[in-house]
Structures are given as C-alpha cells and as structure tokens.
Amino acid sequence: MDLSGPDAIDKAIEAGLDLDGSPIPLEMLKLYREVMAKEGARKRSGVKKSMRNRIVRSGAKHFDREILNKRLIDAGWEGLNPREIEFFFG
C-alpha cells in the first residue's frame, strides 16, 4: 500500500489497515464510517471557508505561526485568530 500523498489515510481506512499493516478494530471503523457519513450529509458554508480551514489545519504542521499567518493574509483570507493560534501553536 502506498503510504504517501493526501489520500494515504483514506486508502488505509478503506482497506481496514493501519499504515503499519495492522488491522484497524471493527468498532473503530464502524464509528469512523458513521461519523463520516453524517459529515458527508452536512450542509456546507462555502468552499473558500473550507479551504482556509484545511490550510490552517495542515499548514500549522509545515509553517510557523508568523509565516502561516502572513501567507493567509497575502492570499486574501483573514489571518489566524486567537483560538487557532492557541490550538495549533499554543
């Protein structure tokens, strides 16, 4: 199984295997699938808002706070808010 790229986790879940090849317990898979089904049915508020949320969640792993904040602003979004700063960088 390819363990790289943005869909590696989805592929592993689909196969019912962790990235190390060990099986994911059935109850974990059932709960995950139930929650994701509910999430899939939820109305969305807008693509740009979802894009920003994804950038903040993933970008916090790759950029420091100042760079991520500047990049958001330069791209036309609002900068990091205090809650995001505390959660991702606190």
Image: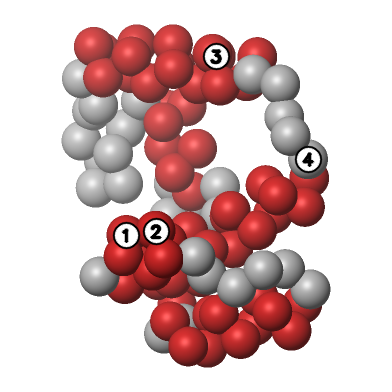
Residue sitting at x 31%, y 72%: 89
Q: Of discs 4 and 3, which sits in the foreground?
A: 4
Q: Position of residue 21 (x, y in %)?
A: 26, 41
Q: Quickly name the residue at label 2.
A: 83
How far is disc 3 from disc 1 in space, using C-alphas? 26 Å
Instruction: Please name the amino acid that badge 4 sits on.
Output: Gly
Mark 4 or mark 2: name the one nearer the start of the chain.
4
Q: Are marks 2 and 1 in contact (CB under 8 Å)?
A: yes
Instruction: Please name the amino acid that badge 1 sits on.
Output: Phe
- Label 4 sits on a secondary structure element that is loop
Q: Quickly name the residue at label 4.
A: 46
Q: Are marks 4 and 2 in contact (CB under 8 Å)?
A: no
Residue sitting at x 65%, y 14%: 41
In the image, taking residue 23 as reference, residue 1 lies left or right, namely right
Q: Of discs 3 and 2, which sits in the foreground?
A: 2
Seen in the picture, residue 71 relative to 25 is either above or below; the reply is below
- Label 1 sits on a secondary structure element that is helix
Determine which quarter of the picture holds residue 35: top left
The circle on residue 87 is 1
- Label 3 sits on a secondary structure element that is helix
How far is disc 4 from disc 1 in space, using C-alphas? 23 Å
Seen in the picture, residue 85 relative to 74 is either above or below; the reply is above
Instruction: Please name the amino acid that badge 3 sits on.
Output: Ala
How far is disc 4 from disc 2 in space, using C-alphas? 21 Å
How far is disc 3 from disc 2 in space, using C-alphas? 27 Å
- Label 2 sits on a secondary structure element that is helix
- Residue 77 or 3: which is nearer the viewer? 77
Quadrant assignment for the C terminus: bottom left
How far is disc 4 from disc 3 in space, using C-alphas? 19 Å
- Residue 62 or 47: which is nearer the viewer? 47
